[in-house]
Image: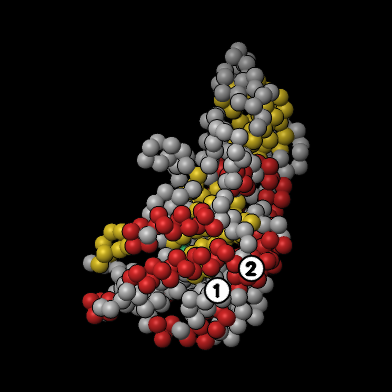
Amino acid sequence: MSSDDATPDPHAWFSHDRFGMFVHWGLYSLAARHEWVMSNERMSIPDYERYAERFEPDLYDPAAWARAAKAAGMTYVVLTTKHHDGFCLWDSDLTDYTSVNTPFGRDAVAEFVEAVRAEGLRVGFYHSLIDWHHPDFHVDGVHPRRDDDVEALNAGRDWDRYRTYLHGQVRELLTRYGQVDYLFFDFTYPGVRHGLPGKGPQDWDSETLLAMVRELQPGIVVNDRLGIPGDLTTPEQYQPAGPVIDENGREILWEACQTINGSWGYDRDNHNHKSPELLVRMLVDGVSKGGNMLLNVGPTGRGDLDPVAQRTLAGIAEWTGHHERSFRGAGPAPFTPPPDARYTLRGDRLYLHLFAWPMNHVHLTGLAGKVAYAQLLHDGSEIHVEEAAADAPHTSMTPDAPTDAVTLRLPTRAPDVAVPVIELFLVSAP
Ligand code: GLC
């Protein structure tokens, strides 16, 4: 994180870049009804293993994922190495339950890492702390077998063995694939669920695990779902109301992880898709509050992105292609925006994102004397700026202009972009 000495901040890229892609892909992609299908439907292991027998993603092309991510303005891609179902997408020495022992027969993580790097993007791993396939993982309130005779099922399960397995697999992931920039652990649930105790940092031995991660990959960005502080916090499927503060009142790095349709894994019959426009607004809203966005796609069981995901990413790409400088390297601004708008700031450039298009003009309070020039960002066309005059004649079109404001004169028709942005060149950086 930021430091007052001269050491370069290894995490600087993260808050600079602002936008990444999450990829949830695994056996549940074949079920195509949510990545929690094993738990939701209380499936037994043999029952669920039918997907491993059918795992043959002939359209797996991580280079295509990486290209779509890059075009959409994302600079890092985070893949589920193992989800809660325990299935591993890499050639682990510690289990046979991997992509190598399926008809697919390959190490998907290795191919992913290579493809992502080849596009000049950063590599991230998601890794589940939970494992519903491992014979030593205790049945708890979220486990698929929670309705069965839990006491009998848990008798003889050796938790130390599971913890060793967890640490060993993380070691494999962080030693075999070169530089890993980002790690998303998932998740800790210490409270009682379904009448059964959950699992917390002492179960994972989070301190030791995190120390190992840092030793193996100095500079990696790690989330806080080990149940102990990490480098960032990851609000899930909601937009924080403002900057995120820790218990000591300090602002911390955060990244909202968001889905296209509410499910992380491919969910064929779920049509609750957010529009590209809404997703762009969410990205901008996050940056205006100092956060990143990690937008998820759930590739199909054959390994490619479904048409909705492709169209959504293409829609976002259309916007980011002309608006990158309003979010990349940008952060919150010390001004209050007008209603239905968000500001971001990058040096002496202030970006006004208009979520609703105003009629003819918009007043920007607190900016009197501060704006040297303004233009629409997507086409670089000048926007007329006037200092609001305290004695505006009553014939003026803006008799209600506040005195500490500048007024922008806008075209009647909103530009044809998902979110119009006005780039304001400030006289000096605030
Ligand atoms: C949750 C869910 C999970 C998803 C993750 C993404 O914790 O358990 O399915 O992978 O959030 O943030």
Taking the spot 55% from the left edge, 73% from the top edge, the residue there is 89
Pick the quarter of the image with the C terminus. Answer: top right
Residue 69 horizontal/vertical position (percent): 65, 59
Q: Residues within 10 Å of mark 1 (few under 14, many from 20)?
A: many
Residue type at the position of mark 1: Leu
Residue 180 in the image: state x and y as whole percent: 59, 59
Which mark, residue 428?
none
Question: What residue is at 68 percent from the left and 23 percent from the top?
Answer: 427
The residue at which mark 1 appears reads as 89
Q: Position of residue 230 (x, y in %)?
A: 45, 50
The image quadrant of residue 423 is: top right
First in residue order: circle 1 vs circle 2: 1
In which of the image's four quarters is ligand 1 placed? Answer: bottom left
Q: Is residue 179 left or right of residue 225?
A: right
- Pick whichever, 29 or 414, lies toward us: 29
Q: Does residue 252 show up?
A: yes
Q: Amino acid at mark 2?
A: Phe
Q: Which mark is residue 112?
A: 2
Relative to 369, residue 11 above or below: below
Residue 198 picture location, percent across and down: 30, 63
**Residue nearer the viewer, 385 or 187:** 187
Quadrant for residue 70, please give it. Answer: bottom right
Crowding at label 2, few (<14), some or many (≥20) Cα neighbours within 10 Å? many
**Residue nearest the observer in this picture, 235 or 224:** 224
Is label 2 within 8 A of ligand 1 (CB to nearest ligand atom)? no
Label 2 near label 1: C-beta < 8 Å?
yes
Residue displayed at 65% across by 22% down: 370
Residue 101 or 321: which is nearer the viewer? Answer: 101
Q: Secondary structure at mark 2?
A: helix
